[in-house]
Amino acid sequence: MSESDNSQPVIDVEKVTFSFKEHRALERVTFQVWPGTLHGFVGPNGAGKTTTLKLICTLLRPQLGRVTVFGHDVREDMPAVRRRLGFMPDHFSLYRQMTVFEYLDFFAAAYGFPLKERDRIVSDVLALTDMDGRRDSLIQSLSRGLQQRVSLARVLVNDPDLLLLDEPASGLDPRARIELMEILRALREMGKTIFISSHILTELAELCDSVTIIDRGTTRFCGPMDELLRRNAEQPTYKIRLESPANGLVDTLRNMLEIVEVTLLDDPRELRIVCEPHTINANTLLNRLMEHNVEIVSFGHDQRHLNEAFMHLTQEGVRS
Ligand SMILES: Nc1ncnc2c1ncn2[C@@H]1O[C@H](COP(=O)(O)OP(=O)(O)OP(=O)(O)O)[C@@H](O)[C@H]1O
Ligand SMILES: [Mg+2]
């Protein structure tokens, strides 16, 4: 499959079943990830996310079903799959006594890059992860957020077309999380496909174009993030923040046919708008608001509904 072929999925997981001895971890898991997308992989603890990622990156072999990456079967064409992807595990062991440069240079050497190319490669991956100033820092002296970025830089050393990231945002503070998300967006802009797992749907909602939801080893949803919201929020709900208090706008909005409910939130500059199903989409609603000359600071799906969608699809919380 060529890099510009957008008609084939980058990852195609078809009816994959996998057991650890007696314990069935995955049962006919099926989903696709399309080129150039940031695709979330979400499920509660023990759902099977890490197991699936290990199958995709060829660390485990599917017992039943088929996994292909860029059209290559993971069982039959392991080297071709490995060449095209970078896997960032959930628990990474950084060589803490090394400097950032030594660590990345070590991996570039392991990939077989000659000495004269390695300096440029390390500089490139440091620039991509916004770590230029940290080249000579000892890894153990870095914060968790920065160590996570070194780990991401390491994954980028062989310039993979597909990144597999297992819960990269867990344990990061909000700033480090936002910075990581920005880097991932920039990598997508470069044309890379990014498959990122998390157990928190709302954490990925803003970032991802599409999402697969998995629970107890089975796929519950695979598709665009918008579709997940449309399907599960019977009444699409938006949260809007305006530059100034919204009191004047509330009655106007309440008179619109498509709008079921308008609520001013604790901060009077914030509104929640509940719409009739299948009548109005985010674009139209935003245009309507603009017609009233209001200054909008932020506009998005109400995260409360995302949580409801997730709970609805996964039923229970934590499992073993
Ligand atoms: N090496 C193993 N041996 C036996 N069972 C395992 C092994 N690894 C995972 N499991 C089991 O397989 C199931 C799926 O585990 P997996 O680690 O893929 O879930 P996960 O979605 O990544 O969870 P988490 O959010 O906790 O990381 C769980 O029930 C887990 O206990
Ligand atoms: Mg896991």
Image: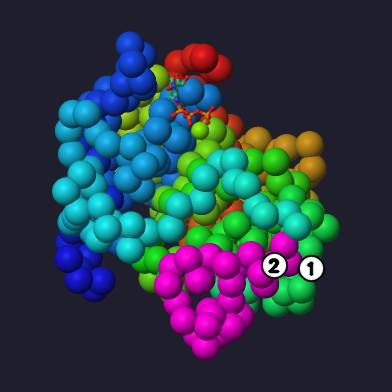
Residue type at tag 1? Ser
Q: Nearer the viewer, residue 299 or 189?
A: 189
Q: Residue at x 25, y 71 (%)?
A: 3
- Marks 1 & 2, CB-CB < 8 Å contact: yes
The residue pinned by badge 2 equals: 100
- Numbered disc 2: secondary structure: helix
Q: Position of residue 7 (x, y in %)?
A: 17, 62
Q: Residue at x 67, y 54 (%)?
A: 95
**172, above or below 63, in the image:** below
Does the magenta segment cover residue 284? no
Quadrant for residue 313, please give it: top left
Q: Nearer the viewer, residue 189 or 234?
A: 189
In magenta, the rendered stretch is: 98-123
The residue pinned by badge 1 equals: 137
Does residue 224 appear in the picture of this structure?
no
Q: How many tags in the picture?
A: 2
Q: Position of residue 66 (x, y in %)?
A: 18, 39
Quadrant for residue 258, please give it: top left
Check the picture and name the quadrant holding the N terminus.
bottom left
272 sits to left or right of 311: right
Quadrant for residue 145, please give it: bottom right
Q: Position of residue 226 (x, y in %)?
A: 40, 46
Q: CA distance from mark 1 to mark 2?
A: 6 Å
